[in-house]
Image (spheres, rainbow, N blue to C red):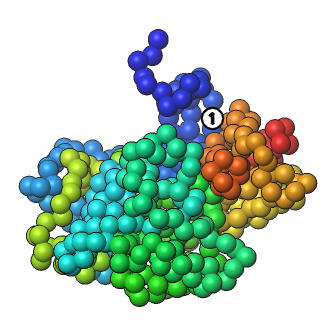
């Protein structure tokens, strides 16, 4: 009997090794990691350079508490990261995961307004659907019904007004104007920030607004004195073919950028936020401290992993690879959509791609969800890992499959992914 508290009651194979785009289990089975775990393993598995960097750092300095010390590796990483993201003067706050990073951004937005003399601003506006993390604050900010329902009594729903998701039928500018309506209804003087994913991940696979959306969103936020927080945990760090996916539809510089997943690419727990100079200066000249913290924030070994991952991303031009390989994979997914009527749409940017599944007779979602899970289970039996989801339509209906292999995936591996997914759709859908 195992002493592990598993995430669900399904059987779990035991992974023993990873290499490139593949994961191997204890029984000798090989899986093509078509979703990089949960869109995490951006540089692929088994990179010895990263393991060596972590070992060196552990030998030199494994831990210091962030209330007492900085570290050389954190100082170097923050500078390199902000340069890569083209965020001059921004300050990087390092934590262990995306939920912690979004919690930090929410708290920072609140403190910023308090320090400015506007303590009435406490609401954080988000979208439906959306997903910002599993911790209570990040989950409250999320617009993902199934994951929130059990914990709803613990949330103050008034603090988390919701805006409709991007509508591809609208121009980006008109789509963004819906933010103004929700702000006015919520009382703009009570809103601290608008938090959004530039390309939606787990809650509505690879949904993105039309060009012009984020520039107009930024204008509206400035007009109302609301901070713009870009949740780039999944879409950032080159996965969508640009360092920041918020800039896909035009030049935008968010007030706070939230990062995770691809920062250390699964080699260590690392996430964080980058805050504008104005926010940092306001907090430091006010209270003199960000009233928040985690024990492992800025952990030197995790940061060393992040620095090594960033070096690989830059040296191998993996952001550019996301564009070229993502285009090839998207073309293949669109071809699958032509062969399998249950695939209503193939979409996405770079190597953050999604399949919308549904009823070909109506062109909408099936009344009973579950198709995405079935396809993912079939694919897993055939040696392909994907990221299924549901609830994009109304919190329950709406099946989709998220795909995001490592940015280092080769042409032949793309071909293998598509071949297996074709078989899975044919046998299960």
| Residue 334 at x, y percent in the picture | 79, 62
Q: Quadrant of the C terminus?
A: top right
Q: How many marks?
A: 1
Above or below residue 371? Residue 125 is below
Question: For numbered disc 1, what is the local secondary structure?
Answer: strand
Q: Quadrant of residue 160?
A: bottom left
Identified at 58% across, 59% down, the residue is 129
Identified at 14% across, 50% down, the residue is 65
Above or below residue 225? Residue 61 is above
| Left or right for 223, reference 54 | right
- Is residue 50 at least partly visible in the picture? no
| Residue 81 at x, y percent in the picture | 34, 69
| Residue 48 at x, y percent in the picture | 40, 47
Q: Nearer the viewer, residue 399 or 404?
A: 399
- Is residue 172 at least partly visible in the picture? yes
| Left or right for 181, reference 112 | right
- Toward the left, the furthest residue is 68
Label 1, residues with CA under 10 Å away: few <14, some 14-19, many ≥20: some
| Left or right for 50, reference 421 | left
- Toward the right, the furthest residue is 361
Q: Nearer the viewer, residue 365 or 417?
A: 365
Identified at 46% across, 84% down, the residue is 220
| Residue 286 at x, y percent in the picture | 12, 74
Q: Quadrant of residue 378?
A: top right
Instruction: Residue under label 1, please give it.
Output: 30
Identified at 17% across, 46% down, the residue is 63
């Amino acid at each position: 009997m195992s002493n592990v508290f598993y995430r669900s009651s399904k059987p779990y194979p035991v992974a023993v090794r990873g290499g490139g785009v593949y994961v191997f289990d204890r029984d000798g089975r090989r899986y093509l990691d078509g979703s990089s775990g949960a869109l995490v393993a951006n540089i692929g598995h088994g990179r010895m350079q990263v393991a060596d960097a972590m070992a060196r750092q552990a030998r030199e300095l494994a831990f210091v508490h962030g209330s007492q010390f900085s570290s050389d590796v954190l100082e170097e990483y923050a500078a390199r990261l902000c340069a890569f993201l083209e965020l001059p003067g921004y300050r990087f706050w390092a934590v262990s995961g995306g939920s912690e990073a979004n919690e930090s951004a929410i708290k920072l937005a609140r403190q910023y307004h308090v320090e400015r003399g506007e303590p009435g601003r406490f609401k954080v506006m988000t979208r439906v659907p959306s997903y910002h993390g599993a911790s209570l604050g990040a989950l409250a900010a999320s617009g993902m019904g199934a994951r929130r329902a059990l914990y709803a009594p613990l949330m103050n729903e008034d603090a988390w007004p919701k805006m409709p998701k991007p509508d591809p039928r609208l121009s980006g500018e008109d789509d963004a104007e819906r933010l103004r309506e929700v702000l006015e209804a919520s009382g703009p003087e009570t809103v601290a920030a608008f938090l959004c994913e530039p390309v939606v991940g787990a809650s509505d696979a690879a949904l993105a607004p039309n060009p012009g959306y984020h520039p107009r969103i930024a204008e509206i936020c400035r007009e109302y004195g609301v901070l713009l927080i870009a949740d780039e945990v999944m879409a950032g760090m080159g996965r969508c073919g640009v360092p920041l996916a918020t800039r896909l539809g035009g030049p935008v510089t968010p007030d706070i950028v939230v990062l995770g997943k691809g920062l250390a690419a699964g080699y260590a727990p690392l996430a964080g936020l980058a805050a504008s100079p104005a926010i940092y200066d306001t907090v430091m000249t006010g209270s003199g401290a960000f009233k928040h913290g985690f024990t492992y924030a800025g952990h030197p070994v995790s940061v060393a992993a992040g620095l090594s991952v960033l070096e690989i991303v830059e040296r191998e031009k993996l952001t550019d690879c996301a564009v070229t390989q993502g285009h090839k994979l998207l073309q293949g997914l669109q071809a699958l959509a032509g062969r399998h009527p249950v695939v209503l749409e193939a979409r996405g940017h770079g190597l953050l791609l999604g399949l919308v599944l549904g009823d070909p007779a109506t062109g909408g979602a099936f009344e009973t969800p579950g198709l995405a899970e079935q396809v993912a289970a079939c694919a897993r039996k055939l040696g392909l890992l994907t990221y299924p989801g549901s609830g994009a339509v109304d919190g329950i209906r709406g099946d989709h499959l998220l795909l995001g292999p490592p940015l280092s995936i080769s042409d032949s591996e793309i071909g293998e992914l598509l071949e297996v997914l074709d078989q899975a759709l044919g046998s299960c859908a």
